[in-house]
Structure formats: structure tokens, C-alpha cells
Amino acid sequence: MLQKIYDWVDERLDITPMWRDIADHEVPEHVNPAHHFSAFVYCFGGLTFFVTVIQILSGMFLTMYYVPDIIHAYESVFFLQNEVTHGVIVRGMHHWGASLVIVMMFLHTLRVFFTGSYKKPRELNWVVGVLIFFVMLGLGFTGYLLPWDMKAYFATVVGLEIAEAAPVVGGFAKMLLAGGEIIGAQTLTRFFAIHVFFLPGALLGLLAAHFYMIRKQGISGPL
Amino acid sequence: MSEKEHKVSRRQFLSYSLMGVGGFMAAAMISPMVRFALDPALEAAGESDFVSVATVDQLTEEPQRFTFQVTVEDAWYTSDQSRTAWIYREGDNIIALSPTCTHMGCVVNWDTNEEFPNQFFCPCHDGRFEKSGQNVPNTPPTRPLDVYDMEVRDGTIYLGRPIQRNSV
């Protein structure tokens, strides 16, 4: 049945070369854990992406119940976690996944560093990777405020004070992030918009560049 | 079955195993989220809370409008909202009708149209209902007005939520 549907579409649109181009490629021996078990370190990048996919999915589902409003944000998070079936699992995935992304990304960076994979001709991919790292930190920072509890509030107080400490542009940066004099209604909506639209958009673009470059240049050689 | 007739190549076996394991993992990941999203549709409706609306001696044979307050729990937002009911007595029977027109949900009024006395009239599309709540044929509504779930205790009338009915 599935084969027939596939054949029907393929006959008209010739989709086989498209996915072959993406999915069908040699995995060199030195990055294949079946040959050298230690090659599992090459999985960290893919695992980072896997956790990112979970973050995007669970985040999409969380927005079905969450409201970025100072009166109701905490209540809506409380409701979705305690009243909605499996809410504690879905929020848990997003909560723990956020930390896991950072951990996996760190391990991936270590592997790239110690295998020297950032060297010519792959310098640009390293640069894009660092940008992805900053976007991820931004996602973590903005997402932290959204439950609007004491921890969220004071973490943001500290975060914005750090921004304010920057020379020359500090005051401006703080005002831009907080959206006003105090950390309040405008900060919450602003952080929500940044967290669910702006940074994920930037992230997807950077990931596309990251993956395009690795396919174009191939995986770096063995040590 | 002999091996020749049913041969699974090494490649096929591996691809099936991978698909199975991958499918299982994907399902484990997706299913809590899907159940989370489906929750409002799968939650059982709550019991109706009864609110005191009027006393029996206030009632007449003529439907009267009574306004009452209900506490509506809407997920994380709880509020008091006002509802109305058309209540009348018919011998020993007490009937409490919902004012919501069964056509498009406008609010009906008793005996306000001079052309159609002693009927519930909906101004939106000229829908009409008999005193019993029965919809008048050849007007837009297709079923009678809803009746409130009702309890009478110690001469006080308590109303719950409206109940749909297909005939009077």
C-alpha cells in the first residue's frame, strides 16, 4: 500500500533522487561506531539535533495551553502541568530537554575541537556552530522567564543586570530586552515572542547552513 | 514454509528492525504530546452545579425571566457569569427553559412580538417557540428550547446546566 502510494508520487514527481541526495551517503569507517566503538563521539551532533527536534515539538504543544500574560502565565503553566493529562511529561520533556541540548552541544563542541574538525576548510561551519550556541543560550534565557514564578523573575533580573553592565550600550540593551522600566507585562510578551518566533527562526536557518556545509565538505578525516 | 519461499535478506531484516525500533521510539516521544493536545476532547464533562434561582411561590403560569449567577471554571480562569432562565408553573410541574435559540444561539424573549402572542420569539431570524419550548414548524429553529437540569428543595428552585432535547 505505502509502496504503491510512493510509486504513484514518484512516477509523477521523481522524488527518489531528492531523498537519496539527503539520506543516502557513505559513512566513513572512522566515524562508524560499528568499526571503532570510540566513534560514538561523532553522534553528539546528531543527538543535539534530535533533542532540538523534541524541544520544538514539545514547545509547540505547550503553547496550546500557555499564555504569556503576567496575570495568567503562572496559572496556565500550573494548569497544563497538573490538570492536563500527560502535561507533566510534556513540560518535563521541554524542561529537561533544554538542559540536555546544552550538554549535547557542549560534547559535540568538544569532539569537533579535539578532532581538529574546525580547521581549514571548515572554519565557517565552526563560526555557524558558535552562532547556534548563542541562539541556544538565548532560547534558554528567554524560556526561563515564561513560567513567571520567583525563580524565573529573579533569573531575569540578574540576566538583565548583566546586559546592563555592558559598556556604552548596556542601558539601551537592558531597555530593549525588558521592553520598559520594569520587568513586567512587556518583558514577558517580548521574551515569549523571542522564544517562540525569532530565535527558533534564526535557529532553523543556522541549522540549515550547518547541515548544508557538512554535506558539502564531508566529515573531517581520521586523527 | 520453506526458507526459499520466504526469504528475508539481511538488508531487509535490518531495515525492518530499524524501522520497528525507530517507530517505537518516535511513538514513545509523540504519544504523550498527542494525548496532551487531545485532553479537552477526552476529558469527561463535569457534573452540573446547582444554583438557587427562585422560590416556587414566585412562579406563575406565565413564563418569567429569572437571572442567576454561575461560577464558570474555564481552565485557569474562574469567573462569575450571569445566566437567565424562563420559568413557569403548569399545575404541579415546573418548567425552566433556556433562553438560547436553537437556531443560531440568539436570545429569545417571551411574548414580545404582537403578531405572535404567547410564544417565545427570537428577533434574529424570526424563530418562534410555543410556551412548552416546542419550536414552531416553518420557523428557523429545528429543535425545542433546552430545559435546565432542575432540583426543587424546600420551595427553592435550583438550576444546573441546560439539557438538549429533540422533542417536548
Image: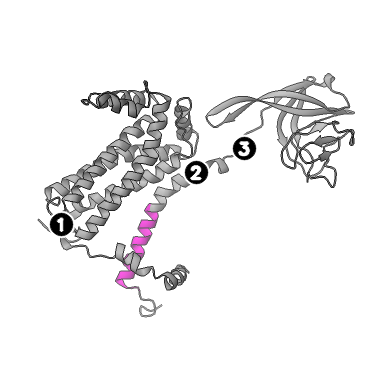
Q: Is residue A102 left or right of residue B166?
A: left
Q: Where does label 2 land, which residue?
A: B37
Name, please, the residue furthest toward the left. Answer: A223
Q: Are marks 2 and 1 on the same chain?
A: no
Place of residue B127 in the rendered image (x, y in percent of width and height, measured from the top left): 80, 41
The quarter of the picture where the N terminus of chain B appears is: bottom left
Q: What amino acid type should be assigned to the residue bearing mark 2?
A: Ala
Crowdedness of circle 2 by 10 Å Cα count: few (<14), some, many (20+)?
A: some
Q: Chain of mark 1?
A: A
Q: Quadrant of residue B129?
A: top right
Crowdedness of circle 3 by 10 Å Cα count: few (<14), some, many (20+)?
A: few
Q: Where does label 3 land, which residue?
A: B45
Residue at the spot x=35%, y=48% of the render? A53
Residue at the spot x=36%, y=69% of the render? A16
Q: Which residues are magenta?
A: B8-25
Q: What amino acid type should be assigned to the residue bearing mark 1?
A: Ser
Label 3, label 2: how far apart the Cα atoms are: 17 Å
Is B12 within the magenta? Answer: yes
Is A19 within the magenta? Answer: no
Label 2, label 1: how far apart the Cα atoms are: 43 Å
Q: What amino acid type should be assigned to the residue bearing mark 3?
A: Ala
Label 1, label 3: how far apart the Cα atoms are: 59 Å
Q: Is residue A4 above or below residue A115?
A: below
Q: Where does label 1 land, which residue?
A: A220
Report the front residue among A51 and A15.
Answer: A15
The quarter of the picture where the C terminus of chain B appears is: top right
Place of residue A98 in the rendered image (x, y in percent of width and height, measured from the top left): 32, 39
Q: Is residue A35 above or below residue B127?
A: below
Q: Secondary structure at mark 2?
A: helix
Instruction: Say which of marks 2 and 1 sits in front.
Output: 1
Q: Is residue A23 something that shows in the picture?
A: no
